[in-house]
Amino acid sequence: MSQKLGTLEELPQDYRDAMSAAGVAPLWPMMRNVLPHGAPNPVTRPGYWNYEKLRPLLHRAGELTPVEKAERRVLVLSDPGRGTGAMQATASIYLGLQYLLPGETAPAHVHTPSAVRIIVEGKGGYTVVDGEKLPMEEGDLVLTPGGEWHDHGHEGTEPVVWLDALDLPLFYYLEGSYAKEGPLQAKRNRPDASQVEYRSAGLAPARKLKSGPRRYPMMRYPWVRTEAALREMAKYTDEGPAELDFVNPETGDDVLPTMGFTAKMLAAGQKHEPPLRSSSAAYHVIRGRGVSTINGERFEWGAKDTFTAPVFARITHEAAEESFLIRVHDRPLQEKLGYYEERAR
């Protein structure tokens, strides 16, 4: 067993003062805080946001603040471990609920972080990414990768709400987070690639000579097709729930460099205990009702609710009725850094 590390208070005051004056500090009193033994000691705590309680606050935001003043009218979901106002739902994932009224347009901008929209409510909303108009239907996954121009609009009659998931905390930590504004984009006169070029799994546009795979060939993943695929997979899944990763249709890679997205279907009464993962996660309920216990905290969830889990969390899901969820996670980032890990419960 290693010897107990010395504390700062054990050092003479004159030595501590001299170190402060020199701009240095001793590592050993802080070592176990930054390098705990066996597993991380996360600041992040499990979080839960009930959509029915947040919905009136979103409507009120629409009454109080025009989109021209807000640029993006969003309520941030803050990690309980960091407190209200924290721009993190987990250490690496930002979450926010964005609200757009009929006839509104959110101005075009481009930024270094990548974003994904999971459509929560409403019809008629759309996002334009690099000139491609992407319709927003409930449950759809819409990409706005870092470095891509995007703006939002609304041609429907009722408010539209979507969940934003960004790798913003990573870019903020690296001091690389910034945005540029620009004019609204001209829209191409054709449906988006999910409706034309990548309509069927296993099929991609014919490749031209010396043309490599596109980095972001498909920007919208329609929920109607995701649910149909989950239902078909569930027929032949003997162990655990049906799960599908959202991937680049040309390379099989995760849709973004730092964030992954996985759709899950739970049958009524089905229980699932995933392994302990080094990745943090946010779960958004597309439809259904159930209970999840995360590190001993119990959350009863329903349609459109969102909840989070820190790294190496002990998680149990149990569906009260047929349920569909999307898990947002940082496994792609961890795999690039070479330390993603799963442990048996």
Image: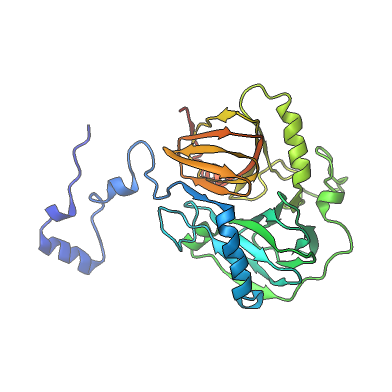
Q: Which residue is found at the position 59% from the left and 69% from the top?
A: 61
Q: Which residue is found at the position 66% from the left and 68% from the top?
A: 110
Q: Which residue is found at the position 65% from the left and 30% from the top?
A: 267
Locate the N terminus by quadrant: top left
Q: Nearer the viewer, residue 329 or 7?
A: 329
Query: Is residue 115 at least partly visible in the picture?
Result: no
Choose top left, top right, bottom left or bottom right for residue 107: bottom right
x and y, in percent, of residue 237 in the image: 68, 24
Q: Nearer the viewer, residue 31 or 329?
A: 329
x and y, in percent, of residue 44 in the image: 43, 49
Query: Is residue 64 at least partly visible in the picture?
Result: yes
Q: Is residue 194 above or below residue 22?
A: above
x and y, in percent, of residue 33 in the image: 31, 48
x and y, in percent, of residue 8 in the image: 18, 54
Choose top left, top right, bottom left or bottom right for residue 102: bottom right
Q: Nearer the viewer, residue 1 or 288?
A: 288
Q: Is residue 303 above or below residue 275?
A: below
Q: Which residue is found at the position 39% from the left and 42% from the top?
A: 40
Q: Is residue 171 toward the left or the right of residue 142 in the image?
A: left
Locate the C terminus by quadrant: top left
